[in-house]
Image: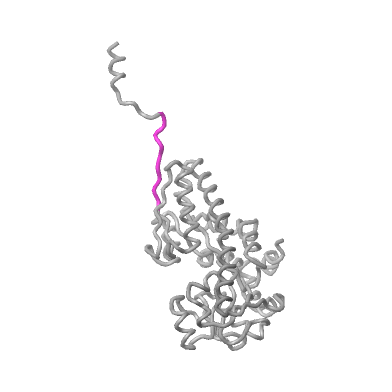
Amino acid sequence: MAATAIISVLPMLPAHAQQTFDATLASVNSPDFLTVQAMQMFIDLAREKTEGGVNFNLAANGQMGSQKETYEQVMGGIIEAAHVSGSVFGASLPELQLLQLPFLYRDNAHMVRVVSGEIGQGLYDKLEEATGVKVLMLALADGPRSVWNNARPIRTPADMNGLTIRVPENPIMLDTFQALGALPTPMPFGEVYMAAKQGVIDGGESPPYALGEFRAWEVGKYFSLDMHTSGHAVLAINADWYNSLPENYQAALEEASAESVAWFNVELEKANEQAMTDAASHGMEINEVDDLDAFREAVAPVYAKYAPIVGGEAAIQAVIDTP
């Protein structure tokens, strides 16, 4: 009875004390940015599906540094996760530059099938082995990126000749526009509007949804759907941290990732269509190119330069041929 009495006054403990994991998810973009909204959805779903077991804190607006810096922080285990462009991985795994080559994708949907399918998943599996960075939320599209300018519509590769076009500081992008006969000019995005207004550049390139972000119709008359690339962003996660999670938590994060990506894909198409409607309503002329194959032929030197790095011409053709 004494033993029973002692037991009866012990505090009641839960049958299973839930383990919790707190983490940081960094992004250079603002919370209003569509991709960051998808990241926030992922965070909310991860918390919900793990019943509070996994709690990401969103550090947006570049609080943790540039994309390259946050990727390196994830790789080093300083932070757990970061929203980054797929282009940042080229230094770690040169083969991944395959997914950044120009004129490979017919549209965003084609890019999503390539990056989320056997080709892209195989490359990102290699990245995880090489760097300890696991990738979720594959193929968050940043495109299709096309050219806007104030000189003339782009219908053929020859129309690019001599145009000064702002591009991101990306070697493949520089090589692409040089092959097309343009004068690629790297500069920060925040300087583009004034540079175009002052005539320092003839134009730039962007996904449709970005046209409204800097009122492109005020500094560019034409938006030509050359669709030179459909870039993509991902959620990079430290693999050691991810593998420390219980299996049911890992499954929950996979589910949260899939649901967030599905939402993003729908919303992005809406945003792209609306942006082009808005641009046209402000007088911007929007046109398609005459022949996409002609642009592929024009950038053949780019394919030749990168083929030895990305797995050969067969690897490039496999992307183009993906149904």
Q: Main secondary structure of the magenta part?
A: loop
Q: Is residue 221 magenta?
A: no
Dividing the image into 4 quarters, which one contains the C terminus? bottom right
Q: Is residue 16 magenta?
A: yes
Residue drawn at x 37%, y 63% is 63
Residue toward you, 43 or 279 = 279
Residue 230 image position (x, y, % from top left): 60, 68
Q: How is the image coloured?
A: one colour
Residue drawn at x 44%, y 49% is 241
Residue 222 image position (x, y, % from top left): 59, 81
Q: In which image quadrant can residue 79 be found?
A: bottom left
Q: Viewed as shown, does residue 213 lie left or right of 178?
A: left
Dividing the image into 4 quarters, which one contains the N terminus? top left
Q: Viewed as shown, does residue 8 lie left or right of 110?
A: left
Residue 149 image position (x, y, % from top left): 56, 83
Q: In which image quadrant can residue 148 be found?
A: bottom right
Q: Which residues are magenta?
A: 15-23
